[in-house]
Amino acid sequence: MKHPIAMNLLVFGPEMDQTVLSELAFIAETGYQGVEIPIFNTDLAHWEAWKNEADRLGLQIFACGIAGPSENLISPDPAVRKAGLDYIKATIDIAAYLGSPYISGPIHSALGVFTGKPATEQEINWAVEGVREAANYAAAKNITICLEYLNRFESYLVSSADELYALVEKINYPNVRIMYDTFHANIEEKNTSEALKQIADKTPHIQISESTRGILGQGQVDIAGLLLTLDELNYQGWIVVESFGIKLPAAHIWRKMFENERELIRESYRHLISLG
């Protein structure tokens, strides 16, 4: 594999507790060179053990965040918008402490919150304003914000590569970039590789996730085609395996798609390696 591979820990659910921490050794033994950690707990002291264990195992840490209804940067309530900005700043602090170059994810707006209408100009402007302020804070800590678009069933501010690219262009800050996720692209794009090419100049970080959210290679995402596109683009970044199971309620997965997390971690890695 030409690219270093990391494992997103949301496969274990949202709680980053001692049980999940103890799995870092297995992830490293499997061959992964990094882990992507969701930051819901914003108590900096909580992450000392994580930093120590990742350092011991030689794992690169990446930090990701997800904004909920109470941290919505595009809420009409200014108190909620402030809470959203406070949350992003807290994740930036933790990312810097953990040695992550990025804080990535759909932090431009809240997961699962809808108005029943397309995004308004005011909502877009709120997102631009909030992300710019967060980006100023992140720049002082040498952190890049990698925004992610979700599919139309999870978000409405941006739900395609061209919409997110336009938002990032409007924000116009050098440390605001894009994270590309194959799960959402597989739903929203007419051609996933062409969509990636359109945003490649602003995309330093990529998540590969199956259409089933399960083991890579057991769904409909054209992973081999994506890797060829990355070669064509001379992509130099990481590949993050992102898979969810029934332990993550927000993913709305009700069917068991794999036996256990270790099977998914191991078999997804083997599939990527087999593709070269």
Image (spheres, grey):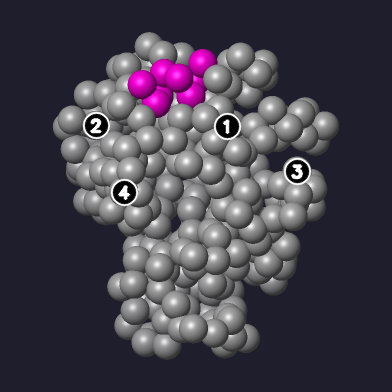
Mark found first going from the N terminus, 4 or 2:
2
Q: CA distance from mark 1 to mark 3?
A: 15 Å
Residue farthest top in this picture: 29
Mark 1 residue crowding within 10 angstroms, few (<14) / some (14–19) / many (20+): many
State the residue at coordinates (49%, 83%). 116
Residue identifier under label 4 = 254
Mark 4 residue crowding within 10 angstroms, few (<14) / some (14–19) / many (20+): few
Asked whether 134 or 192 is in front, the reply is 192
State the residue at coordinates (51%, 16%). 270
Mark found first going from the N terminus, 2 or 3:
2
Image location (x, y in percent) of residue 239: 57, 32
> Main structural element of the magenta stretch: helix, strand or loop?
helix
Q: In the picture provided, is 28 more to the left or to the right than 236?
A: left
Q: Do tag 2 and tag 1 residues touch (Cβ < 8 Å)?
A: no
Q: Is residue 256 magenta?
A: no
Q: CA distance from mark 1 to mark 4?
A: 27 Å
Residue farthest front in this picture: 255
Mark found first going from the N terminus, 1 or 3:
3
Residue identifier under label 2 = 20
Q: Which label sits in the foreground, 2 or 3?
A: 3
Q: CA distance from mark 2 to mark 3?
A: 33 Å
Mark 3 residue crowding within 10 angstroms, few (<14) / some (14–19) / many (20+): some
Residue range of the region highlighted in magenta in the rendering: 263-270
